[in-house]
Every structure is written in C-alpha cells, then in structure tokens.
Image (spheres, coloured by chain):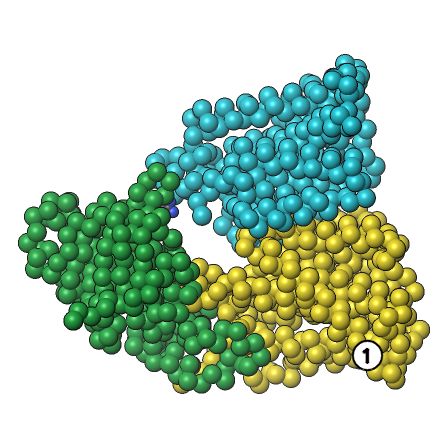
Chain colours: A cyan, B yellow, C green
Amino acid sequence: MSSTLINILFFGLSYGMILYMTSVGLSITMGLMGFVNLAHGVFAMLGGYATVTLMNSLGVPFFPALLAACIMVTVLGFVLERLLYRRLYGATELDQVLFSMALIFISVAIARIFWGPLAQPIALPKYLHGHIDLIGATIPTYRLFLLVFGSVVAAALWLGFDRTLFGARVRAAVEDHAMAEAVGINTDRLFALTFGLGTGLAALGGGLGAEILAISPGYPLQYIIFFLIVVAVGGLGSIKGPLYASLIIGLADTATKYIMPEAGMIFVFAFVFLLLRWRPQGIVSRRKG
Amino acid sequence: MTRPTDTALPGKGMPAIPASKRWLEAVPWLLALGTYAAAPQYAPLLTQIFVMILFAMSLDLLVGYTGIVTLGHAAQFGTGAYVAGILAARGWITDPTMTAVIAMVAAGCIGLFFGSLMLRTKGLAFLMLSVASGMFLYEIANKATGITGGDDGLQGVVFSPLLGLWEFDFRGTTAFFYSFVMLFLTFIFLRRVVNSPFGWSLRGLRENDLRMSAIGCHNYRRRLTAYTIASTLAGLAGAVQAQCTGFVALNSLSFELSGAVLIMLILGGSGRLYGAMFGVPIYMFAQDYLAKRDPTNWFLWQGIILLILVLFARGGVLSLAERGFHACCRRRPG
Amino acid sequence: MSELPVLEARELNKAFGPIAVTRNVNMSLMRGERRALIGPNGAGKTTFVNLLSGRLRPTTGNVFLNGIDVSRADEATRSKLGIGRTFQITSLFPALTAHENIFLALAESAGFGMHILRSARSYGSLHDRADELLEKVGLLGAAATSVQQFPYGQQRLIEIAVALALEPKVLLLDEPAAGIPTSERDLILDIVKALPSDIAVLLIDHDMDLVFRFAQRITVLVQGAILVEGSPAEIAADQSVRDVYLGERS
Ligand SMILES: Nc1ncnc2c1ncn2[C@@H]1O[C@H](COP(=O)(O)OP(=O)(O)OP(=O)(O)O)[C@@H](O)[C@H]1O
Ligand SMILES: [Mg+2]
C-alpha cells in the first residue's frame, strides 16, 4: 500500500515536471502576447527528435545532445517568431488557432518524412538506468533525476522571473502592455526573446521526457490537451501556476492509472472542468482582467 | 428610408447577394440533385457530404456568428450518432424520426451541460475545455464497450423504414434524400436564426461582447443559448450519419473530427452559412485525392492550405470568389 | 420634501490590489440633472463610471438606482434598469453598420434579444427609431456603412447614439468629445443639451470650456476622492481646484 503511494508520488511528480518544462513557456508567451499557440508541443517534439538523433546517429552523449537540441530549437523558435508568429499578434483568436494548427500539421508531416511514423527510442546514459530503494519502494533513478532536475529548472525560472531585470520586464509587460511600452520596454524584442526561451524549455522537456511522452510524429496532437490543461489551470503569464498545475495533473493522472486504469483521463477532465468553473482564470493569473 | 436591404449590408454575416440574384440561392441545391441524377452511384458519398455540411453549418453558428471558437464540436455530433445508434441497435426505438429527435435532445443537453461549464472562460482556457469535452466523451465511449462497441464502433445498426415508407436501401437512395431534406430544413432554420434579433445579437457578441453587456445583453446566457442550438443541430448531423450508414465510429467523438470540421468551415468561409456548402466538398475531395497515396502528404497539404488561408485568404473560398466577382464587376463598366 | 436621486453612489471604494483608485465617493444625481465630472488624468473618473455602470464591482460601498440597491447587479441588468453609458475608448461593433449598431441596442433594451425565429427586418418601429437616432447625430446618410469605416469623430457620435437608443434614465458620458475637431465637439454638446430634460447626464471631459457650457453642477475628483462639488461659478472660484487641477493644465 505505502509502496504504491510512494510510486504514485514519484512517478506522478516526475511526470508533472516534464509537463511543467514543456508547458511553462506556453504560459508565459500566452500571458505576454495573448497568442493562442496550439503548436507549442511542436517545439517539444523537435527537441526530442534533435536529442535522439544527435545521440543515435552522431553518438553525442545525453546531456550535450540535450543542450544542443535546446539551442537549436530556441533559435528555430526565435526565427519562427520573427518570420511568422509576429504577423498574427493582432489577429483574431480564430486565425491564431488555425495558424498554429497549420504548424502542427506541417511539423507532423515533416517528422514523418524524416523519422518515419514510429516512436523514437531514447538510450539514456547508464547511470540513469538503475533503481533506487526508497522507504520501501523501488524508484527508477531516471524518475528521481527528473524530479531533481525539474525542481532546479523551476527554481531557476522563478529566480529569473522574480529577481532579474529581464524577468521584471516580462512581468511588467504581462500585466500591462501599453504601460510597459510607455516606460521604455522594447516589448517587440521581449516577445521574441521570451518566445525563444519558451520554445527552448519545451525542447528541454521534450528531450528529457522522451521516455515518458514518446517522441513520434503524433506528439504535438497527442499531448496537446496536457499542455493546454497545464496552462489554463495554472493561469496565464505565471511561473508558479503551471508548476502547481503540472504537479497536480501529473499526480492525478498517475494515481488514476494505478488505482483505476479503466477510468483513463475521465477524472482529470472532470477535475479540470470543475476547477475552471470555480476559477475561470486558473490558479494564478497575472494578467489584467 | 434606409431599411437594411441585402445589398445595403456589406461586411461579414449578411448575405451579400442582391435581391435580383436571389435565384443564386437555389444553385447549390439544384447542383446536388443534379449530381445525383447524373450519377446515382455516388449517393453514399453525397450523403456523407450532406451530413458534414449540416455539421459544419451548426458550427458556423458558433464560430462564424458568435465568435466562439470550439475544438470540441464532435462531442455533440458523436452524442447524436451514438444515441441514435444505441437506441436502434438495442431495438428500443428504430424509427428514424423518433431517434433523430431523441438524439437532438440528448446532444442539446450535452451542449447545455458542457456549455454551462465552459462559457465563462475565454481564449485558451475555453479552447482547452472544448477539447476536453470531446475527449471526455470519447474516453467514456471508448471504455463502455458493452454499450458502444468501444474501438470497433457500433456496427450493423438497422433502422426501420423512414416514415414507415422508405427502407434505407443498399444503393443509398433513401439515405440521400433523407439527408438532403434534413440539411435543407436545417439551413432554412439556421437562416431564420441568424437573421433574427437573436442572430444579430450573436454577431454583436462576436464583434464586441463588452459592448453587448453595456446595452443590456446577458452574454453568458446568450452564448449558452447559441451553444445549445448548435449542439442540437450537431446531434442531428450525428444521428443522420448513424441512420444513413448504419454504423457509428468512435471517431465521431474525436478531436480529429472537431478539428476537421472547423477546417472545412473555414475553407469555405465562416459566418455566412454557405461557407459549409463549399468548404466540405472541397475538403473531402482534397482529402480523398491527397490522402489516398500517403497520409503524410495529407497532413502536409492540410497545413499548407491552412497557412495560406490564414495568411493570404482570410474568409475562405467564398470570400475569394466574392472578391474576384467584385473585381470583374468593377472592371466591366469602366 | 426632497426628491429621490435617480442615481446615488454611497461610500464607494475601489482598490486594484493595494492601490485605492476610488475613495469614499458619495454622489447623487437628480432627475434631469446635468453634471460634469472633472479631474486630472488618472484621477479615477473612468473607474468611477465603471462602478456606476456595473462593469466593475466596488470593494465596498453601494450604488442606488431610483432608491434600489443595484450594487450586486451586473452591467446588463443595470443597463436594463436605465443606466446608459459611452466609453472613453470607442466601443462599437466594428464590422456592423451604423444602423445595425443602433438596432442592436434598441432590440436589447426592448427585450427582443431572444427572439430567435422572427426576422430582424420585420421590426419596423425599431428600424425607424434607429434612423431617427442616426438623423439626430447627422449620420443618416451613412446608415449602411460599417462603423469601422467612419472617421473617429463620427464613431464618437455613433457611440452616443447607441447609448441613447437604450432610453436611459441616467446617461454616463466618458469623454465623449475627447480628441475630435471643435466643430464636432459643438455638435456633441448640442446633442447632449437637446436630450429630454428628465434624463440625468454625467459628463466627463477635460475641456473646461465644454464643461462649463454644459454643467449645472460640477464634481471634482482628485486621486480617487471628491475634492469639491458645486456650481460652475463656485468651482471656477475655488482655490483648491485651481491649485490641483486648473493650475496644472495652464
Ligand atoms: N484594471 C485596473 N487595474 C489596475 N489599475 C487600474 C485599473 N484600471 C485603472 N487603474 C488605475 O486607476 C487609476 C485611475 O484610472 P482611471 O482610468 O479611472 O482614470 P481617469 O480619471 O479616467 O483618467 P483619464 O483622465 O486619463 O481618463 C489609474 O492610475 C489607473 O492606472
Ligand atoms: Mg478615463
């Protein structure tokens, strides 16, 4: 019994950390630019593919591959923002939805062309393979590592958001665009940087989580609901909200799988509906109503 | 004095057809009947197109008129399909009209239920909930294999003859006329709705919902009403599909279908009811042509078409045609 | 016996987080009164109007309409009860025609918004009324033009016509004449002056000339609180107003 509990806890929280890393960028860019970017998962998928390819074809070790993937996707995100996304900042929600659906379709096709329809296996380094005994349960080292790594990323993001000038600018712009611009913040550049950063984080989540959320062409569609839930439940433009939301969703989903697998996502959905009925803006929202 | 006439109202939402060109309205319908007369072997395909047009038209009330962008409209379509399918499969009620009515009521209730949970949110949260509403029912249908047939769908559903007169035959003649009439009735109904004060107020909500509440509109209730009407009609589309094909696929509740019907609508042009009539056949033919060889191809093309629509051809095929038409008109007298 | 105010704000307070934007504001508008609300930028005038119209809920305090507490009522309900307003930032239905914009307001206030099956064109008297209102603001000729195509000044006129369509008992005008040419300002002033004498009007504007030509009474709001209230002559003579407000502008 207690070992089940510990399992749920570790599997759920590490899963939540992956959700967090892949989604937090979406929360910030949504809060900042109000852009409904359904294609955020594309960047996580590309991060996963880049990591796996660098490792399998070029023999790059795990962490350097992850880093390189992050950088590549950050650059790609930055370029796409400059070339395409920014054209649609003032557009209607419908146009933004359609545009990001278009990106999803195109990226699905590209992924299929380059990597085929099957999921890509990731060969984790040896030292992440084993298990660790913890208060009566056996926890995969990888899961523990995800938990620690995710916490470090979350802490770093929180510090960056709360304590740096860049973070202060982002917060100001999330709260009031016009005002931020009036006090001399270059929101245009801020958007591009933040967007790049958000996509880079997604890539990190994609690469790190490749064993949990398998990297296949269907990725951006298959997991879209998770990213959307995390952002909507967490609240737009926040760092902490998505963290809480990811951990809750990770735990809830894992617990259901352990205790009542036949229920699938039903409880998670029910929870989300009720929560948003009660708090339409999510748990934490920085955006002005 | 300046009583609005059709010609006097440009912009989205109102038919831009001058009164003298009213006969144009009959063209799509005659075209459909003509196609059938020329090639009756295509009846099943035409039926499928009618069903999707009906479905897309119901979505237009939300997306095009009210400005509610939903990615979960299949929740109601599937509800309609399963309710009609299950009633007949179990032999409880097999009369097509009765099952259609019950399916509509069920879908309307589902719409009312989800709508009441969703419509206080906006933007990304609403989109997420709309996706979740579809997936929620999908999961239930997937797991309740005893009732729904799960992954295999509900097969071999037999309905009694339409109005006690016409059997749903092998060649699909009854199905063709039945779906044609249902589509026509829906169109007439929706046209009334969008031209009523209620329909105008929906466009008001789309344009500026804050102003609507300042002039005394209870936006939430108004949207919920629109959502329920659209849901009921989506349920009808689902029921008609179940009746005409004798089959309900799990796919009828899927996110993919919700996305596809949105694309079909946008492809034709939203906010004008006619958009669905053009978008659906174009999409279905394109899919048939492009996906046959390779599904990857189809993803790529769908993406490219969407990208072009958003970046260069807002308003869809109808809008393009209209612009071309106006360009010609302007050139002629000059 | 003193008459009951049409609209009354009692001890209204509004704070956004730690910032108090409206502080203990008391104000009564009598039937037919022409009142101006002035104050420097950021004084909280728009916020106050939002509290009255129901767009914002007060942190504490109450709003009474004809003696009835409407503090809990939402904007739509208050609109139905007789509060009409315009917005500082033009708020119309951009893709709809001028006629349709006004028709929508007429239909809502007449309670026809849920008529689902009757053609909107068959409401002859409403269309006539919409045309009358357009004529009043001098835009009848452009009734079938979508409002996004109008120049700014004319959009401000349509904004007023939409509010008038509600036949409000109280009309709240948030800087209706800001940023438009003088000739159209005068037109706006004429329209407002020609309103039925039983409508109470609260007008916000920064143009002192306009304000003094319009108002019977003037309320001065500074940093969310009422500084003084009085007749135009009293306000013009008030030293504190000169210090805080007029002085700053000259
Ligand atoms: N939603 C909000 N959240 C936080 N602060 C707000 C909000 N709305 C207004 N404020 C602040 O409240 C103060 C008063 O604003 P308000 O718009 O009411 O002033 P105003 O008197 O109408 O100014 P102006 O003459 O420029 O129109 C301003 O400092 C503004 O920044
Ligand atoms: Mg103001």
**Which residue lies at the image location 72% right of the left edge and 58% below the top edge?**
B75
At mark 1, the secondary structure is helix
Q: Where is mark 1, residue-wise? A: B177
Left or right for A56, reference A194: right
Q: Quadrant of residue A187?
A: top left
Q: Between residues B99 and B7, which one lies in front from this camera angle? A: B99
Residue B304, given in percent of the width and then of the height, sits at 69, 50
Residue C207, given in percent of the width and then of the height, sits at 19, 57
Q: Is residue A61 above or below residue A49?
A: above
Q: Is residue C13 above or below residue B57?
A: above
User: What is the chain identity of the residue bearing mark 1?
Assistant: B
Q: Between residues B34 and B73, which one lies in front from this camera angle? A: B73
Left or right for A95, reference A106: left
**Which residue lies at the image location 64% right of the left edge and 77% below the top edge?**
B189
Residue C235, given in percent of the width and then of the height, sits at 10, 55
Left or right for B238, reference A269: right
Amino acid type of the residue that numbered disc 1 sits on in the rendered structure: Phe
Q: Quadrant of residue C28?
A: bottom left
**Which residue lies at the image location 32% right of the left edge and 56% below the top edge?**
C62
Residue B169, given in percent of the width and then of the height, sits at 92, 76
